[in-house]
Amino acid sequence: MIRPRVVLVEPQIPANLGFLARALDNFGIEDWWAVRGCRIEGTEAERTGAPSRERLLDMQRAETLDQALAEGTHIVGLTARQGYHRRPLPLPELPALWREFGPAARPVLLFGREDRGLEEEECARCTHLVTIPTHGLASLNLSHAVAVTLYALSAEGLLGEASVAEPERGHEPWAPLEDRQRLAADLLAFADEVGAPVDPRDLEPALRRISAQAIETRDLRLLWRILRHMRWLEEQKPRD
């Protein structure tokens, strides 16, 4: 298994970014992104992250969540909230889930804001949700949450190498999120073109939830072929 990308949604406290850089250094994680959020330069981040200055400066910036997740195949969101649409796995179950991803996966660990975590739409982008069980306060400090999650994987020997592993024989690579979203957008457009008897306000979120699920490249190609054939059939219909 390759090492995951770590993505932070709108981090708010600069000092946490410094502590986070140190935690990432501890576990050999180089690929990390912030979606908007606070700055590093001239803030407490430079002090708290001084022992890992190089890792701190490695942080990539994204203006949208989709940009930070685009290359991911399995998006694991960390959330403390429970609800009708949220049934996160407890962290101790993450290693078993991680093994199921296989060596061709490009996993992402997604963490929310310090004050309110991940919002519903961001959770909808995830293929899996995980919660860190606690006694007392429901949530951990952001840097602590990242460190605990990485330790849970590291203790099972699952962080692996930094480079992309070769797929196993007979195992197709996983389709990136951006490709799944492109198919969903084309399906939505086609449904509108043919006047499908479904409200777009229902179809769009349904396709967004479906595209959030991990899918093998070969299966995505099959769906593309079906969509192209349906478009061809539609074009063959006589026009008035």
Image (cartoon, rainbow, N blue to C red):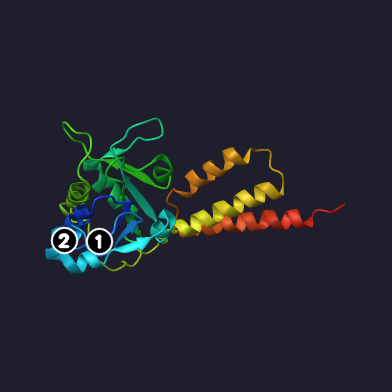
For badge 1, the amino acid type reads Ile
In the depicted view, which residue is nearer to us: 194 or 14? 14
- Would you name the residue on which mark 1 appears? 40
**Image coordinates for residue 94, horizontal then vertical, percent:** 26, 45
Up/down of 121 relative to 147, above or below: above
**Distance from label 1 to label 2 (Cα)?**
10 Å
Pick whichever of labels 1 and 2 is earlier in the sequence.
Answer: 1
- Residue placed furthest toward the front: 42
Helix, strand or loop status at disc 1: loop
Q: Residue at x 56, y 44 (%)?
A: 204
**Image coordinates for residue 195, horizontal then vertical, percent:** 71, 44
Instruction: Using a 10 Å C-alpha cutoff, classify the residue at mark 1 as few (fewer than 14 neighbours), some (14 to 19) or many (20 or more).
Output: some
Residue 221 placement, left or right of 50: right
Dot in front, 1 or 2: 1
In the depicted view, which residue is nearer to us: 125 or 2? 125
Q: Residue at x 39, y 57 (%)?
A: 69
- Would you name the residue on which mark 2 appears? 49
The image quarter in which residue 70 lies: bottom left
**Can see residue 48?**
yes
**Image coordinates for residue 88, horizontal then vertical, percent:** 32, 38
Q: Quadrant of the N terminus?
A: bottom left
In the depicted view, which residue is nearer to us: 187 or 36? 36
Helix, strand or loop status at disc 2: loop
User: CB atoms at circles 1 and 2 under 8 Å apart?
Assistant: yes
Up/down of 124 relative to 45, above or below: above
Instruction: Using a 10 Å C-alpha cutoff, classify the residue at mark 2 as few (fewer than 14 neighbours), some (14 to 19) or many (20 or more).
Output: many
**Can see residue 72?**
no
Q: Residue at x 16, y 61 (%)?
A: 49
For badge 2, the amino acid type reads Gly
